[in-house]
Amino acid sequence: MRWAEEISREELGKIDQVIDKYREKHGSLIPVLKEVQDIYGYLPKKVQHRIAQGLHLPSSQVFGVVSFYTFFTTIPRGKYIIRVCLGTACYVKGSKQILDNLQRELKVEAGGITRDRKFSLESVRCLGACGLAPVLVVGQDTYGMVTPGKAIEIVRTYP
């Protein structure tokens, strides 16, 4: 995964392979974007433009899809995305303190990425697990009934 705006030849080759795989398939933009984001780590404008050219689509269409779906990102993200629920059930059970503790521990504000690019920290309005409040998600792993101290312990287990 790269974190700079410059795209290496190797990455361009991989991106072009994905585009070539889907070029003749109708409705392939989302799978292409997903695979390219997996390769490059995010979808900066240069990469979106390359996809648009390769699939013979307007850049505005590619940007529209990228900006519509939340699983696509135009900014670098950490290896692990930490999501802290600040919905009502979680908030009343202390999720704000969890977020505050993680910000201090990781030295990053919500919406940011750690210096080592290991973690992105996000606050979200609902994770759909109100019965487990407060809820924390790290990558694909969901943790319920988390305390501020336990959140730190959980995050420290990620390599």
Image (spheres, rainbow, N blue to C red):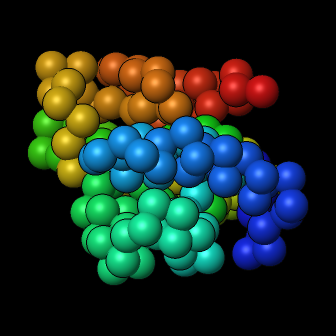
Q: Is residue 145 above or below residue 10?
A: above
Q: Count all numbered tags in the image, as a single digit.
A: 0
Residue 43 location, x and y as percent?
Answer: 55, 63
Q: Is residue 37 left or right of residue 6?
A: left
* Residue beneath the point at 86% across and 53% down: 10
Residue nearest the viewer, comparing 155 with 56? 56
**Residue 92's quadrant in the figure?**
top left
Please report the residue visible at 45 percent of the width from the left and 61 percent of the height from the top.
55
The spot of residue 126 in percent (x, y) is: 20, 42
- Quarter holding residue 83: top left
Q: Is residue 143 visible?
A: yes
- Judge whether residue 91 can be spotted in this image: no
Q: Is residue 52 above or below residue 115?
A: below
Toward which corner of the image does residue 132 lie, by quadrant?
A: top left
Relative side of 104 to 116, left or right = left
User: Measured from the top left, where is residue 31 in percent x and y?
Assistant: 42, 41
Please tell me which residue is depicted at 58% across the width and 58% down the height of the picture: 42
| Lateral position of residue 93 relative to residue 135, left or right | left
The answer to whether residue 43 is left or right of residue 143 is right
| Image position, residue 148 (x, y; %) | 48, 36
Look at the image and tell me in which quarter the C terminus lies: top right
Query: Between residues 141 and 149, which one lies in front from this camera angle?
Result: 141
Q: Residue at x 85, y 63 (%)?
A: 8
